[in-house]
Image: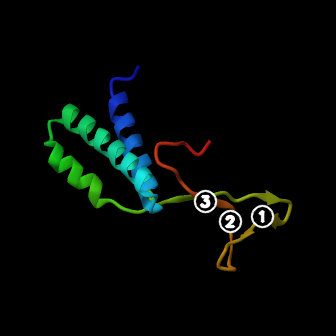
Amino acid sequence: MKEEAWLEWAVRLQALAQNGLAYNPAVFDRERYEEIRDIASQMMSAASGIPKSVVTELFASEDGYQTPKIDTRAAIFQEDKILLVQEANGLWALPGGDCVIIMTGA
């Protein structure tokens, strides 16, 4: 097991909680996501020495779907043609999409 595995787990838990909370879940689900976020805060606090209240405040200040706020695209050629996709807004772009936290593009 990697020495920093706890950090990856805490980040993943926080991301799962934030993603769940982003979609305005029912009360029962909201409580579960808040509990997951609290567990992630406790893990970060215990391992880093930062007070739990500070970590909790930082986690709670993030809203919306948790991503690195970047996307990936691929240029695909076949002879003299290039593959494009039509986006929801009607514009054309290279195929790709948003990156997901802690996951590789492969």
Tell me whether circle 3 and circle 1 mark residues in contact (CB < 8 Å). Answer: no
Residue type at mark 2: give it: Leu
Residue at image location 68% in from the left, 78% down from the top: 91
Question: Residue 36's x, y, as percent?
Answer: 36, 42
Q: Is residue 67 visible?
A: no
The answer for how far apart the CA atoms under marks 2 and 3 are is 9 Å
Q: Position of residue 76 (x, y in %)?
A: 75, 58
Which residue occupies the foreground of this view, 71 or 80?
71
Is any part of residue 42 visible from this angle? yes
Q: Which residue is mark 2?
A: 94
Which mark is drawn over residue 97? 3
Which residue bears the numbered disc 1?
Answer: 83
Q: Are marks 1 and 2 in contact (CB under 8 Å)?
A: yes
- Please name the residue shown 41% across and 19% down the image: 1
| Disc sitting over residue 49 in the figure | none
Q: Residue furthest top?
A: 1
State the SS at label 3. strand
Q: Quadrant of the C terminus?
A: top right
Q: Left or right: where does residue 8 sit relative to residue 45?
A: right
SS of the residue under disc 1: loop
Q: Nearer the viewer, residue 52 or 101?
A: 52
Is residue 99 found left or right of 4 in the rendered image?
right
Q: Dot 3, how many residues are within 10 Å of its Cα: few (below 14), some (14-19), or many (20+)?
A: few
The residue at the point 84 percent across, 65 percent down is: 80
Sooner in the amino-acid sequence: mark 3 or mark 1: 1
Q: Counting other residues with Cα less than 10 Å from the Cα at mark 1, is it few (<14), some (14-19), or many (20 or more)?
A: few
Which quarter of the figure has residue 11?
top left
Q: Nearer the viewer, residue 81 or 59?
A: 59
